[in-house]
Structure formats: C-alpha cells, structure tokens
Amino acid sequence: MMDELTIQFTFAVDDSTLEDEERQEISRKLLRQLRNLDEIEKVERTEDVNPEVGSKPGFATLVGFLTAEVSVKNIKSFLGFLGERLGDKPIIINVKSGDKEIKIEAKSKQEILEIEKIVKSLFAIMDGEGNV
C-alpha cells in the first residue's frame, strides 16, 4: 500500500541573509519539535556525504539541514507543521523514496502545503500509476 511507504524529506531554510549560526539554531529548534511528533518516523541532522578532507567520518553534518522519514499518510500533517514553523522563509526540500528523488523549492506556507500533492503525483507518475 502507498500509505505504508516511507518518504524521506531533507530540508533547510534557504535564506541567504542568514548566517550559518542562525540556520543551525532554526534547525536545532525544529529538530527538537519534530522529535516530539508522532507523525514522524525518524528525524536527524543531515549527514554530509562529501565531508571535507580530514574530518571525522560520521560526524560531518550539513549546516541547517534535517532529514525526516514520514509515512505517506502523515505527509500532510508533516508539511502543515513545516508550513506553520517555516512558512515565511524560503526552503529547499529534497524528497526521496527508494531510488526516486525530487527537489522542490517553496517560498511560502501555501507552497509548502502544496508539496503533498506534488509529491504524491510525481511518485505516482514515476511508478506508472497515473494518479494517487
């Protein structure tokens, strides 16, 4: 069933006026809040898959990025939560399920809420279902 499918969302505030420390603080607060939501299967800081030479493996994370695993049935409430917390900030969201991945940019609460339809439609098309 599609509802049992877990989707991976990697996201960050994409505001060039913010310093790294400010983006990190936003992600720290959001991480604490997301860990308290029942709708989220798992949420962590996003690991850097291409760390700088000399950095310790397993300790490199991307500044301000979080990765959350969410079941399809909980996408709407997850995106609603993000919209409430980050609706006034531009964000980048990478959505991944298995080997399928899409990148979406949102600049408002409304655009964040519309991501659910986009995600479901794109994955249905990629799976050859036509609609969800």
Image (cartoon, helix red, strand yellow):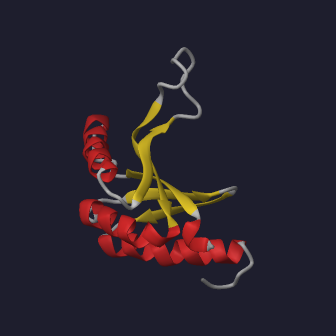
Query: Where residue 17 sits in the image (x, y, percent)?
Result: 28, 47
* Quadrant where the image shows the N terminus: bottom right
Q: Is residue 23 above or below residue 48?
A: below
Q: Quadrant of residue 64?
A: top left
Who is closer to the viewer here, 23 or 37? 37
Residue depicted at 42% across the width and 42% down the height = 44
Is 91 left, or right, of 58 in this rendering? left
Q: Is residue 89 visible?
A: yes
Residue depicted at 35% across the width and 58% down the height = 38
Number of numbered tags placed on the structure image: 0
Who is closer to the viewer here, 72 or 80? 72
Residue depicted at 53% across the width and 75% down the height = 118
Query: Where residue 91 sits in the image (x, y, percent)?
Result: 38, 58
Query: Where residue 101 sits in the image (x, y, percent)?
Result: 62, 59
Q: Quadrant of residue 112?
A: bottom left
Q: Is residue 92 above or below residue 77?
A: above
Residue depicted at 24% across the width and 45% down the height = 29
